Image (tube, coloured by chain):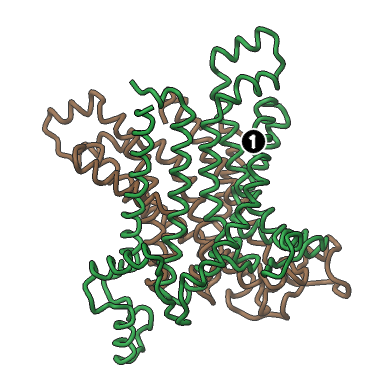
Chain colours: A brown, B green
């Protein structure tokens, strides 16, 4: 662990920062999430420092200004990050648990179970994820647990493919055959033989899936089909403040910065994990 | 060439079968809740009469299989049903919007495809030097931001600060082609950026793959310069994977359009779909979902067909 490359360190630092902000949101945020503290779209302290604020404003007590109904944008961003990161994490957990267990199961069992599961996954993947999610969300109530389940289920197809591909390679190893001859059951083979050996490529993939989930839930909220107001989340903040863009108010662009930095830092970490894995395992990954 | 004809027929039949199964999946997707669709559309406070009316209108009193085949039969004869919220004919509303959406996607593809291939070639030519590194850094950044945010960033910088193009993309029949193009300049730019990143990375990977072949080394040893090697020897052999990349990204474009249309208030399919999802207008959502899925599957099928046609090894399988 000593020689972590500098890019991975930067990634780890910012990823940790975002997660800590999400966990300790109520302690960090200067104001309440839904508390109206000022006028509509007051300029931010940063704009004033850079000298790009509209004329007549020389000071501001809000680091990022206020939003479309006068709530503190920094507090909204911190609470919004909490919601976004929570949903993305939970959906990633759902998709990994389901996708990897089913993928391993298909690889170990083989035969018609494998065939029917794999063909069904192919079928689901032939519909664009966003379109399928919109179809399902048109009849289900849009609540946080529902979002997590829909996103997790749709994404588990991708995890299934990876898990199955990795497990098929491992399944033919001698130690798996030894376990079989010993008389171990399917669940032992999945959790004690295959899972430990398939863990590293799956962990690297987890980073990418997490980012995809962040982008996905932001998109859904932006379309008004994700997290519902007054709850804050990064996509919703864009939706609330988008009308300001036409008047030259950049409040809606703040989440762009947050999402991009989170995505890039997680990507840097995932890249490092992936490189480490491939060099350790002789290229298999 | 009976063998290649057989391969093509197989692929097209598979595509049609897939389309049929997907229609079933989309239909089932709207019944995924154990409860009643009418109940979840109207909410808990609905009166029993309203529920009964909606059930009758949706045909919910019939068994699910019969409803599915009625729906499918309607689609095959061009009847997509009527919208619950407005009572208008869905096929009529979609017709105009579909051509608007295809207009937008067409111009984005016209710009993105040659640009992506050229930049991909450039990245290969200057591999591991600054043009390559800069291109991959920019592509990493642009796939880390959701489409709608790229849309607003461009809108803020180009439409509001620089005032080059309008910030909303309203088009109608009375406009000339030039006016239309100016109106859709920003959404086209965003879509181009979004698919450019993916397409360039995949083009670069496809050509690099070919560059490792022995005949490339021969070409280098006989004294051709870098660009000549790429154009005369690597590029023709990379056409099949590149066409594949292009088709996959066009399919991606069709989905990206949904969000971008909402950002720029463009009167296309995507906005129509999103509007009716929030209104819980199930027939419209099913019809739009099926059309998007059909375009997506169709483009993927074209990608496979081009791959079969352009690869001599696939034409003569052992």
Against A184, residue B213 (above or below) is above
- Taking the view exactly as shown, the residue that stands out farthest to the right is A55
Question: Residue B43, located in which quarter of the rendered image?
Answer: bottom left
Judge from the rendering whether residue B2 lies leftward or rightward of residue B196; answer left or right: left
The numbered mark 1 sits on a residue in which chain?
A: B
- Taking the view exactly as shown, the residue that stands out farthest to the front is B1
Observer-nearest of B31 and B314: B314
Against A177, residue A163 (above or below) is below
Number of numbered discs visible in the structure rendering: 1
Percent position of residue A126, x then y: 40, 50
Please give the name of the residue rendered at 56% of the width and 55% of the height, measured from the top-left corner.
B256
Judge from the rendering whether residue A274 lies leftward or rightward of residue A6; answer left or right: left
Percent position of residue A193, x then y: 25, 34
Question: Residue B3, located in which quarter of the rendered image?
Answer: top left
Quarter placement of the N terminus of chain B: top left
Q: Secondary structure at mark 1?
A: helix
Quarter placement of the C terminus of chain B: top left
Which residue is labeled 1 in the image? B117
């Amino acid at each position: 662990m000593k020689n972590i490359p500098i890019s991975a360190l930067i990634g780890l630092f910012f990823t940790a920062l975002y997660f800590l902000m999400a966990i300790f949101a109520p302690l960090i945020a200067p104001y309440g999430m839904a508390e109206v503290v000022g006028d509509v779209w007051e300029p931010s302290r940063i704009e004033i420092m850079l000298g790009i604020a509209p004329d007549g404003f020389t000071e501001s007590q809000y680091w990022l200004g206020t939003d479309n109904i006068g709530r503190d944008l920094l507090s909204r961003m911190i609470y919004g990050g909490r919601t976004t990161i929570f949903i993305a994490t939970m959906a990633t957990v759902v998709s990994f648990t389901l996708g990897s267990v089913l993928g391993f199961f298909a690889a170990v069992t083989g035969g018609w179970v494998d065939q029917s599961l794999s063909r069904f996954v192919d079928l689901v993947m032939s519909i664009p994820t966003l379109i399928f999610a919109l179809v399902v969300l048109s009849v289900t109530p849009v609540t946080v647990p529902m979002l997590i389940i829909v996103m997790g289920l749709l994404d588990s197809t991708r995890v299934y493919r990876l898990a199955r591909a990795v497990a098929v390679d491992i399944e033919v190893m001698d130690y798996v055959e030894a376990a079989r001859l010993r008389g171990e059951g399917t669940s032992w083979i999945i959790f004690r033989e295959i899972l430990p050996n398939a863990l590293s490529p799956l962990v690297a993939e987890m980073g990418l899936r997490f980012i995809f989930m962040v982008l996905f839930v932001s998109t859904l909220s932006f379309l008004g089909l994700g997290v519902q107001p007054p709850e804050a989340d990064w996509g919703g903040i864009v939706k609330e403040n988008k009308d300001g863009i036409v008047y030259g108010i950049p409040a809606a662009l703040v989440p762009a910065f947050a999402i991009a930095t989170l995505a890039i830092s997680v990507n840097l970490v995932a890249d490092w994990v992936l490189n480490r894995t491939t060099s350790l395992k002789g290229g298999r990954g | 060439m009976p063998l290649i004809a057989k391969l093509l027929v197989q692929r097209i039949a598979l595509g049609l079968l897939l389309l049929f199964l997907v229609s079933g999946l989309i239909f089932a997707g709207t019944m995924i809740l154990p409860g009643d669709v009418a109940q979840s559309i109207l909410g808990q406070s609905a009166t029993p009469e309203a529920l009964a009316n909606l059930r009758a209108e949706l045909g919910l009193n019939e068994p699910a299989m019969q409803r599915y085949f009625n729906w499918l039969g309607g689609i095959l004869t061009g009847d997509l049903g009527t919208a619950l919220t407005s009572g208008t004919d869905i096929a009529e509303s979609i017709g105009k919007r579909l051509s608007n959406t295809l207009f937008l996607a067409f111009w984005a593809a016209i710009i993105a495809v040659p640009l992506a291939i050229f930049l991909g070639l450039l990245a290969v030519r200057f591999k591991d030097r600054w043009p390559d590194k800069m291109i991959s850094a920019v592509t990493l950044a642009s796939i880390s931001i959701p489409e709608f945010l790229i849309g607003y960033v461009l809108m803020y910088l180009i439409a509001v600060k620089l005032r080059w193009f309008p910030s909303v993309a309203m088009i109608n029949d009375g406009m000339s082609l030039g006016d239309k193009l100016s109106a859709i300049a920003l959404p086209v730019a965003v879509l181009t950026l979004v698919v450019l990143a993916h397409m360039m990375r995949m083009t670069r990977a496809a050509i690099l793959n070919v560059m490792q072949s022995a005949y490339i080394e021969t070409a280098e040893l006989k004294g051709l310069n870098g660009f000549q090697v790429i154009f005369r020897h690597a590029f023709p052999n990379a056409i099949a994977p590149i066409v594949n990349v292009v088709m996959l990204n066009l399919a991606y474009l069709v989905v990206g359009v949904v969000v971008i249309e909402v950002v720029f208030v463009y009167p296309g399919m995507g906005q129509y779909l999103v509007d009716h999802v929030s209104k819980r207008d199930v027939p419209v959502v099913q019809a739009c979902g099926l059309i998007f899925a059909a375009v997506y599957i169709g483009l993927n099928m074209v990608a496979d067909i081009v791959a079969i046609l352009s690869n001599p090894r696939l034409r003569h399988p052992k």
